[in-house]
Image: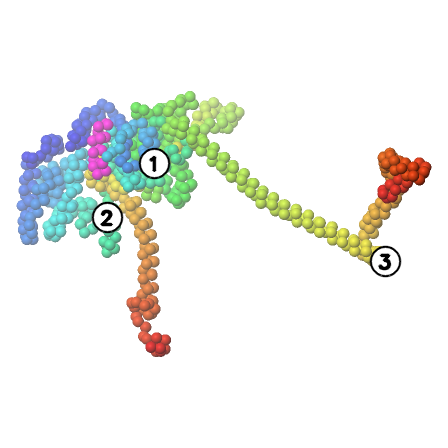
Amino acid sequence: MVTKSKLKTALAAERGVDFHKLALKKKEKAARKKKETGKGGAKPVKEDDAEDGDSNLEEDESDDEDASDEETFDIAQLDESDSDSEVEMEEKIQRKPKPTQKAIKAAKDAKAAKLIAEAEDDDDEEEEEDEEDIPVSDLEDLSPEDKEDLIPFTRLTINNTTALLASLNRIRLPTDKSVPFATHQTIVGVEPTADAIEDVQDDLKRELTFYSQALDAAKRARKLLKAEGVPFERPNDYFAEMVKDDGQMEKVKAKLIETASAKKASAEARKQRDLKKFGKQVQVAKLQERHKAKRETLDKINLLKRKRSENSGDVGATEADIFDVGVEQEIGKYSAGKGRAPKKEREVRPRRQEEVRQVWRRRELGRHERVQCQADEDRHERQDCQDGQVREEPADCWEAVID
Amino acid sequence: MAAVYKSLSKGSSQKTEAPSNGVRKNKQRVLILSSRGITYRHRHLLNDLATMLPHGRKDAKFDSKSKLFQLNELADLYNCNNVLFFEARKGQDLYLWMSKVPNGPTCKMHVQNLHTMEELHFTGNCLRGSRPVLSFDAAFDMQPHLQVVKELFMHTFGVPQGARKSKPFIDHVMGFTFADGKIWIRNYQINTVEPSKTKVDADAEGEKPASSKDRTKETDMNLIEIGPRFVLTIIVIQEGSFGGPIIYENKEFVSPNQVRSDLRRSKAGKHNARTEQHEESLLRKGDLGLQTSGGRKMPVDALDSRELFA
């Protein structure tokens, strides 16, 4: 006790711990333990000397039934101060290496371990882990061969509610009605949001429930803040630095535009594709239709031709009446067209021929005359002929050529 | 020791202060820092959170992974009473430590599904440093460990009133939801819309001016997400700050290392099964005497050409 640090002595003084009594108690306990272990034939447990006074205290508390009233008072005072003081933290920190120490000793001497376990029977599960048990989280370090013959055991989960609540009370900020809402701005939902989520993997519904939770909180917060007169909405003329700067917002906008345009483009492309597919079908149908029409007309023509040939053989006169194919009109039209043309030709042609003949005669006459005249002159010189005869001859000869 | 001494002295000073002050003022400062070896996404998430917390103090990467208790002294140096520490492991896993300095508690969580503000491309935006409304799921009040975590969230993510760089208006909500054993965190902008229709109606009908005023005052509200998004799985709660006994441990948490190794093993199992099958078939063939070496030898047939023409 002499080697205690100044701080600890100060601390103990503040708590009102009587060191003399503690020392007495410790001696008493050591004696008792020696007696017990001596009975079992095992070596005395010396670990108490390794620990320091504070942690010792707690052990004493746990197994000291015959402690005097004064002592229990002291201990009770210490114990209740545990909940929100730093002493407890220190104690717990120092208590941490204890289980391992004990575990080693347990391997050496089972009886001593049993004793210690008895001494600590009201402590938490965290200290009851033996060295034979390896938690699942430590299995990673083992090699696969070692793992095969291991029977995995699931570690008991630690949930020290009293300690949790104690540390919660130590740091808790008041959020009840006693303080204005603006100090904490915390809203707790009415009922668990998780109940509204059927499937956590369903992104849309999950996000929707999160959204509704936040929206509800925002509405409640606005009501409370308005009641307290705290400004809530940002006025439109209040400009300040934002979480996302302009560059980032520009990027967001660009992204939005990009997605919108991409959507539009894809829709357009799909439309075009459909149109193309459909257009092809239309084209094919049209072609087929055209082919069909052509075939039909060809058939009709063939039929007509046949009919006509039959008609000319003086058989179809009655046949046409029987089958009533309206061939007569067709033929009539056809034959009328054919019959008219030669008639006209006969009318026009002589006149036209005459004209052509005259043109040729006029045009060619001069040249022929000249040529012929020279030739005739030569001939006339020899045969002594007249001009008129010479003129007639080439005209006749040209007529023959034209015809 | 220094921490203990400080808390002691602070406690004594507070005792004298408390009656005169009435309510203790909510003073929070958060030290935000990461370990070494974080990826760019982790860094961006940290930056996003730092922009949202005007009462935060961002510090350089912390060098050590084993001596986390040194963070207490670091936080003390910067006058911070909260620490938000991002620990990266193997360059891929991110763990988030939330701690109250100096006396704890500390909560260690695994960060999953993280999407930073930048990569989410949400259209929401809010003032830098405006105080958020913290919306907690009702589940947070049901279990003690969740209560502790909620309190830690309140201290770290709630901007205290009158913080130095905070803005006077409230324009965003932070949602904390406990679902599927995980904590899902979302951040929304509060967008108020003028309900023009009701306003027109009220004017047209010419009702009592007071009621119409009330109606116009209560504008419609909708939320636009800002980002970032992430999911936290509680691993462990310690009583002290980066130390002390473990007072809560999540049994359901499976370490990402184990997940990966399981995947690898299942892949390896396929190969093992195939080789086993191959060996078995060889053995069977040997038993039938179909193999030249090993297994059972077939009795020599009298009609074998080698016997006949020997």
Residues packed near mark 2 inside 10 Å, few (<14), some (14 to 19) or many (20 plus): few
Question: Quarter-wise, where is residue A55 in the image?
Answer: top left
Q: Quadrant of residue B108?
A: top left
Cα distance in 3D space between marks 1 and 3: 102 Å
Residue A193 percent coordinates (x, y)? 37, 40
Residue at numbered disc 3: A314
- Label 3 environment density (alpha carbons within 10 Å; few <14, some 14–19, many ≥20): few
Label 3 marks which chain's residue?
Answer: A
Could you say whether the residue bearing mark 1 is in a helix, strand or loop? helix
Amino acid type, label 1: Arg
Residue A182 in view: yes
User: Residues in magenta?
Assistant: B64-79
Q: Nearer the viewer, mark 2 or mark 3?
A: 3
Query: Which residue is disc 2 drawn over?
Result: A141
| Amino acid type, callout 3 | Asp
Residue at the image point whose x is 21% and y is 32% from the top: B72
Nearer to us of marks 1 and 3 is 3
Could you tell me if residue A214 is visible in this image?
A: no
Residue A235, image x and y in percent?
41, 23
Specify the subunit that label 1 lies on. Answer: B
Residue at x 32%, y 54% (from the top left corner)? B269
Callout 3 secondary element: loop
Could you tell me how far apart the alpha carbons at marks 2 and 3 are, in whole angstroms? 114 Å
Same chain shared by disc 1 and disc 3: no
Q: Is residue A365 above or below residue A246?
A: below
Q: Amino acid at mark 2?
A: Asp
In the rendered picture of this protein, how many numbered marks are placed on residues? 3
Identify the image quadrant of the N terminus of chain A: top left
Q: Residue A184, image x and y in percent?
A: 31, 30
Q: Is residue B265 above or below residue B141?
A: below
The residue that mark 1 highlights is: B41
